[in-house]
Amino acid sequence: MPILETRQVSKRFGGLTAVSDVDLSIEPGEIHCLIGPNGAGKSTLFKLIVGTYPPSGGEIRFRDGDITQAKPFARVQRGMSIKMQAPSVFKELRTRQNLHIALQQKFHRQALVDEEERLLALLDLTAHADKAAGLLSHGQQQWLEIGMALALGPELLLLDEPTAGMSPEETFKTGELIKGLNATGMTVLVVEHDMAFIRQIAQRVTVLHLGKVFARGAIDEIVNDPGVIEIYLGK
Ligand code: ADP
Ligand code: MG
């Protein structure tokens, strides 16, 4: 049974249909990539899943419950954590204070301190723990934001373009981080358009084009699909 499912989900903005009758199915324990050229509707579908706004039609199910109308916070409480496309760390606070705030939702006292240190090490931010977050590199700020999502102990981690603006080295490191989390049993949905990164991490892929599902399948099938190659090169 899928952990997350969208059934015939649509979103219209006035006369524009950004997402059109999309069926998406995420299996527990997989790394699933949602890909497609710019303007395909990826971020809009992501926002429907996390509850930024309601769909114009269709149904969204998470852990066997209907969450179509659920508030974002209720979705987080059920076990999804989110990193939106634009980083939004508290720049004037220290790196560890950013994590501390997120960890306060779930942890207390010593457990919180232990988890803070564990996350700092996992994100390779221990040496920068007492720096103002605004002084971190762009890539480090993205990792910190992933850390804030992890602080909530999610079953499903949702990342919208986690490597946007990163160097190739930072991008590769982010891929290894995501694979490491997945190896501990976490299900991950990643919205992405960087093909090298997608090849590094993806198990199954759903391709969006002009708001519709264009293709879906295992990563090896998708990267060799002439139609997928064409919509990527044709943008
Ligand atoms: P992607 O993330 O795949 O690049 P988006 O989901 O951001 O694509 O956008 C899909 C389409 O919907 C685009 O044509 C975009 O301009 C439009 N769109 C996205 N958000 C809004 C909005 N809030 N209001 C109006 N149009 C929007
Ligand atoms: Mg986007």
Image (cartoon, rainbow, N blue to C red):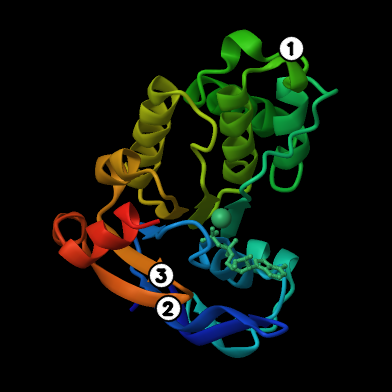
Viewer can see residue 31: no
Q: Quadrant of the C terminus?
A: bottom left
- Residue 219 drawn above or below residue 184: below
Q: Which residue is mark 1?
A: 131
Q: CA distance from mark 1 to mark 3?
A: 41 Å
- Residue 210 drawn above or below residue 7: above
Label 3 secondary element: strand
Looking at the image, the residue that sits furthest to the top is 127
Percent from the top left, x then y, of residue 186? 41, 51
Looking at the image, the residue that sits furthest to the front is 234
Percent from the top left, x then y, of residue 208? 40, 69
Q: Amino acid at mark 2?
A: Lys
- Residue 220 drawn above or below residue 112: below
Image point (44%, 53%), residue name: 190
Label 1 secondary element: loop
Q: Which residue is mark 3?
A: 209
Q: Nearer the viewer, mark 1 or mark 2?
A: 2
Ligand 1 falls in which quarter? bottom right
Q: Which residue is mark 2?
A: 212
Q: Amino acid at mark 1?
A: Lys
Q: CA distance from mark 3 to mark 2?
A: 5 Å
Q: Amino acid at mark 3?
A: His
Residues under numbered marks 3 and 2 in contact, where contact means CB atoms less than 8 Å apart: yes
